[in-house]
Amino acid sequence: MSGTPSTAAGAAAAASGSGATAPAARARTGTRPPGLASRAGLGVLGLAVVALAWWLCTAVLPAEGAMARRFAPGPTLSALAMLLTGPDLPGHILVSLRRIAVGLGLALAVGVPLGLAIGSFRRLEAALSPAMQFLRMISPLSWMPIAVMAFGVGDDPVYFLLAFAAVWPIVLNTAAGVHHLDPRWLLLAQSVAATRWETLCHVILPGVLGHILTGLRLAIGILWIVLVPCEMLGVSAGMGYFILDTRDRLAYPELMAMVLLIGLLGFLLDAAARALYRRWSR
């Protein structure tokens, strides 16, 4: 492992000697990454293109009286404003976020210790890897009938399905973090006679925290996708339930408003996970 830094240093010295540093080379070739303001502007431009396509496909191109016009931006935004100021929607959002928190907490409680064990013991990894690869390839939604029969109707099957969906990226990323630990850290802990608990708390966990946060972000994305169909399991609250309710009431602008709101909340959750990772990486 000591050869890698020296090789990188030699490459950097060679580049410096030739008078072509990496930032200067990127500047000359036009590949310099955009700044924060430029990225924000490009992001707003991308959203504007999506909004324009939505408007054209629902308000301009369809004929008068077509079903697509019920999902146009005007009625949708009016319905969204009404829902956000009404008494019902905030309660459904809080119920969904609570389920996300419980499912994610269960996945972390199982996934982090399991990932640490798999990453630390090669024989355990060899024994569990085929089973994990098999189980994680099963769609969580395919467990829905079994979950209802096993846990009944209510929140329990939703918690099970969400935890099942979220545990795999956490396990795999935690195990990968253990594999990428610098062995010199562990040797240093042994040299100062650190106990296993001290090594775990002060060496291993801080060393794999970045990988755990990466798995957490991936898990949030999966959970948010799985949440809505899971909330169609006979529960009486949540955003998935509310979407079914708007469909049954033929309230199509409200249905489209819920789709927008789900996308917005998912974006904010992902942004929070990215901010947490960036804060740790400083």
Image (spheres, rainbow, N blue to C red):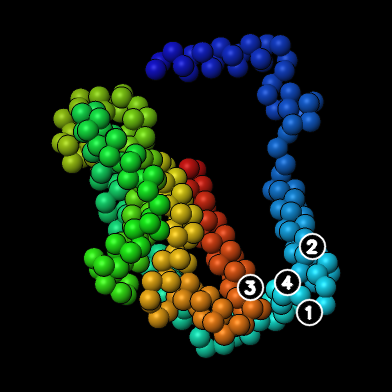
Question: Is the C-beta separation of discs 1 and 4 under 8 Å?
Answer: no
* Crowding at mark 1 (Cα within 10 Å: few <14, some 14-19, many 20+): few
Q: CA distance from mark 1 to mark 3?
A: 17 Å
The kind of secondary structure element at disc 1 is: loop
The quadrant of the rendering that contains the N terminus is top left
The kind of secondary structure element at disc 4 is: helix
Q: CA distance from mark 3 to mark 2?
A: 16 Å
Residue marked by disc 1? 65
Residue marked by disc 3? 256
* Crowding at mark 2 (Cα within 10 Å: few <14, some 14-19, many 20+): few
- Side (left or right) of 36 relative to 222: right
**Residue at (80% x, 70% y) in the render:** 62
In the rendered image, is residue 225 in sight? Answer: yes
Q: Earlier in the sequence, mark 2 or mark 4?
A: 2
Q: Position of residue 150 (x, y in %)?
A: 24, 65
What amino acid is labelled 2 in the image? Leu
Foreground disc of the pair 1, 3: 1
Residue marked by disc 2? 52
Q: CA distance from mark 2 to mark 4?
A: 15 Å
Residue marked by disc 4? 68
What amino acid is labelled 3 in the image? Met
Q: Position of residue 230 (x, y in %)?
A: 41, 66
